[in-house]
Image (cartoon, rainbow, N blue to C red):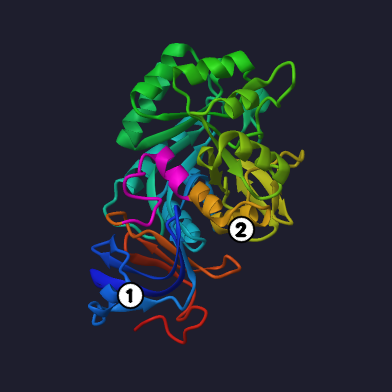
Amino acid sequence: MNLPDRFLIRGIGRLLTPEEEVRDAALLVEEGRISAIPSARELQGLADLPSVDVGGATVAPGFIDIHVHGGAGADALDGTQEALRTIASFHAGHGTTALLATVATSPWPEVLSAVEAVAEAAGAPDVRGARILGLHLEGPFLNPARRGAQPLESLLPPTQPLLEEVFQRAGGHWVLVTLAPELWPEELIRFLVERGVTVSLGHTDATWAQARRAIALGARQATHLFNAMRPFHHREPGVVGAVLLEGQVRAEIVADGIHVHPAAIALAARMKGPEGIVLVTDAIRAAGLGDGVYELFGQEVTVSGGEARLSDGTLAGSTLTMERAVANMVRWGFPLSQAVSMATAVPAAVAGVESRKGRIARGYDADLVVLDDAFTVHLTFVEGRIAFLRGPSVPGRESLWR
């Protein structure tokens, strides 16, 4: 839906920046960016501008999902622009305005084809749905003992030629990699870090010492903390202990109430602080489609009651969406501002876009989500354009347009 280059968003009951909460606010958007949060007096001088009235709803920064495989029947491993557009459009309907398309383990030629498709989508000047920021490569350089739902037969040991192949296909769009550090020579971890790829510890059986070594080499994240990794033990704290204690390492959390108990999330947040927790969906192609049998990384996965599992019971990604992750965190006792920050400002920093995304501030991209009190998404803006509209009105207004 087209909007003019300069317009107002009016009728904001609660604006989350997320550093502060502003009541009865408005936003001025110019050429896809937030130009101002005008005062009531300043609004008088803008009365003739085209405007969108959100009827007293909450407006937050658009969510940023750094770990998402698919949705609405598509997966990044499909390796097509159509699949990536489907994923981006589906998640925009749930408040996500930017994402890292996550490519999992598959036969190596399929991985490279998917990497190339993600790079093409990330480099596209025009977007539909959420903006694809780049690549999260989750496999195949994982520990077979902690592979989770990733297919054993396609796992590979890391080598420099393989990494260089990914760089050749991804260009400068390789943002994040999940790896098992115990399988990696130091020089290969340095190879990634020196080229600006964020190293995330995941699908790993690393000991405390091995995890600490990787962190010293530059690893700065953990993939879906607690899941698919050596569990904490009081005589061998393992990767979980290292991640919880190292302040510079952020931790992904799949906040669906299935992957991690809320008490474990509270423990992690208390150890890391809200700035150290990244909410992710780990959503698969079944997200948004309901219960049934689906394909995942070349395997059959069954979704029942929203839970996705392989035939042996192994968790296989999720059907979570970002607005539900935020809603769950609030339901479990986290302040709204913290929950929103974990879905916006923190992942923006991971993706390297914190200077333009993840906050509502002057000069930032107009990536915005309009929510009601039940956390239902009514409207999503991506860089000042409407990427999702639930209907012609929002709560409290007969019409969205003025």
**Which residue does the numbered mark 2 point to in the structure image?**
327
Q: Residue at x 46, y 87 (%)?
A: 398
Mark 1 residue type: Ala
Q: Position of residue 64 (x, y in %)?
A: 45, 50
Does residue 270 appear left or right of residue 18 in this picture?
Answer: right
Q: Residue at x 39, y 23 (%)?
A: 193
How much space separates mark 2 and mark 1, taking CA atoms? 30 Å
Mark 2 residue type: Ala
User: Can residue 3 be seen at all in this image of the molecule?
Assistant: no
Q: Residue furthest bottom?
A: 398
Q: Which residues are magenta?
A: 344-361
User: Can residue 189 be seen at all in this image of the molecule?
Assistant: yes
231 shown above or below 256:
above
290 shown above or below 281:
below
Foreground residue among 400 and 74: 400
Q: Residue at x 59, y 26 (%)?
A: 245
98 shown above or below 43:
above
Does residue 59 appear left or right of residue 319 in this picture?
Answer: left
Q: Position of residue 108 (x, y in %)?
A: 48, 30
257 shown above or below 13:
above
Dividing the image into 4 quarters, which one contains the C terminus? bottom left
Q: Residues within 10 Å of mark 2 (few under 14, many from 20)?
A: many
